[in-house]
Amino acid sequence: MSKEWESKIKDFISKIEKENLTTFFAATHPKYSTSVFRFTKEPTHVALPYVWKYKLAKERLLELAEILPPEEAERRNINFVNPGLKQYFPAISAATLPTLRGGIQMLKPGERAYTHRHTANAFRFVLEAPLEGAYTIVEGYKLAMRPGDVILTPNWTWHDHHNEGNNYAIWFDGLDVITAYWLGGVFYQDFGDVNVDKYQKIVSSNEDVMARYLGVKPTFESLPSHLPSSDNPLFYYPYSLIRNSLIRIAEKGKGDPYYGIELEYTNPTNGSPAFPTMSLKIRLIKGNDELKPIRRTENRIFVVFEGSGTFEIEGQKYVVEPFDIIAIPSWKKYSIRNDANDNLIIFSYSDEPVFKALGFMREKREE
C-alpha cells in the first residue's frame, strides 16, 4: 500500500479510538493494532508462569501480623499477584491467574475473623495449624482445620475462622472472585449487617456434614433457602481420608504418565467438580518419577504439600518445596519431576469447569 493510504488509515484509527470505537482491522492487524488481543493459532496470554516461595510469603505474613490486628482487617492475608496481569487488572487487588485468586491467611492463637459471605466461591487448604483449636464455621458447621484439610465456603455461605489453639494457623485461600468480578456477579455481606452479633452460632460439626453427604444424601434435608442449588453441601474434605486414598492407589502402580495418581474433590450430590467454576485436585507422584509434558486450556495453580520436586514450564525449571505456589496459565507446556525417594503430593485448583462449559477445553499430551 502507498504511504498516502497508510497515513489515511492511521488517521482514521486514531480518530475512532478517541470515540471509543474500533474495527476488526485495527484491533487485529499486527501493524496497526495497539492491543494484545487478536485471533491466534493457539492460545496466548498476558499471564506469566510464576512460582512464589512459601518461605518469603510466610515471612511477609508474619511481618504483617505484627502490624495489622484482626479487628482492623476483615481478613489478614498475603495474596499472590501475577506480574503479567498487574497492568490489566488495576481495579482488582490481586489476580494470580486471569480467573483465579490465591493467597495465604493467618490467625494467631486467640484470634478470630468475623462472619461474612460473598457470591465468589472459595476454599481453604490448610498448611499449618495447631493440633487442636483451629476451625472454620460454614453455615453453622464447625469444621476442624488440620494440615491438608480442604474446607469449602461456596457461593453465599456464611463463614468465619477461629484459632483457639496454642500456635498460629495458616491456610491457602483459593477464590473465583476474578471471574465473578468481570462477569459483574460480586455480592458481599457482613453477618453483623443483618444480625445483632458479628459471629454465627455453631449448630453442628465436620463429623455431621460428612455423615450427611459422604457417599449418602439425606432425603429429608435440602440446602438453606438463601443458598443457590449449585452449592456443594460437602464443606469438608479431611486430608487423612484423601491421603489414605492416594497411598492405597499408589501401592498398585504409578497412575497416569501425565498426571500421576490424581484425585478430584467432587460434589457428592451429582459427581461434578467441587465448584461450578473451579476444579480442585490432588496428585501423588512416586519417588524419582517424572510426569510427561502436557498442555491444557485451563488456568491452574499448584500448592506443594508433601515432598519436593521440579516443575518445568515452557523450558524453564523451578525447584519447589512444601507450600510453594506455582501458577500455570492456559496452554503453557509443563511437566513435574519428583527428585526424591519419598512421595510428592501436590494440591491444585483451576477454572477447568468454565473451559468445559464453554466448549474450550483441550489437551495436548507430549513426549
Image (cartoon, rainbow, N blue to C red):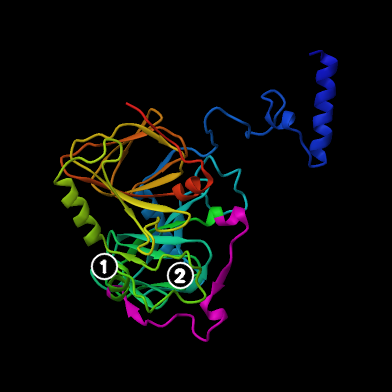
Please determine whether, in this image, residue 227 is positioned above or below residue 291: below
In the rendered structure, the answer to whether residue 237 lies left or right of residue 51 reads left
Residue that lies at the very extreme toward the front in this rendered image: 219
Q: Position of residue 292 (x, y in %)?
A: 30, 32
Q: Secondary structure at mark 2?
A: loop
* Residue at 33% across, 80% down: 204
In the rendered structure, the answer to whether residue 91 lies left or right of residue 357 reads right
Q: Nearer the viewer, mark 2 or mark 1?
A: 1
Q: Nearer the viewer, residue 299 or 57?
A: 299
**Separation of disc 2 and disc 1 at Cα?**
20 Å
Q: Pointer 2: what residue? A: 69
Tell me the amino acid under the disc marked 2.
Pro
Q: Quadrant of residue 267?
A: bottom left
Q: Position of residue 144 (x, y in %)?
A: 30, 70
Q: Residues within 10 Å of mark 2 (few under 14, many from 20)?
A: some
Quarter of the image for the N terminus: give it.
top right
Residue 73: tell me if it is visible.
Answer: no
202 in the magenta segment: yes
Q: Nearer the viewer, residue 238 or 64?
A: 238
* Residue at 48% across, 61% down: 121
Q: Pointer 1: what residue? A: 130
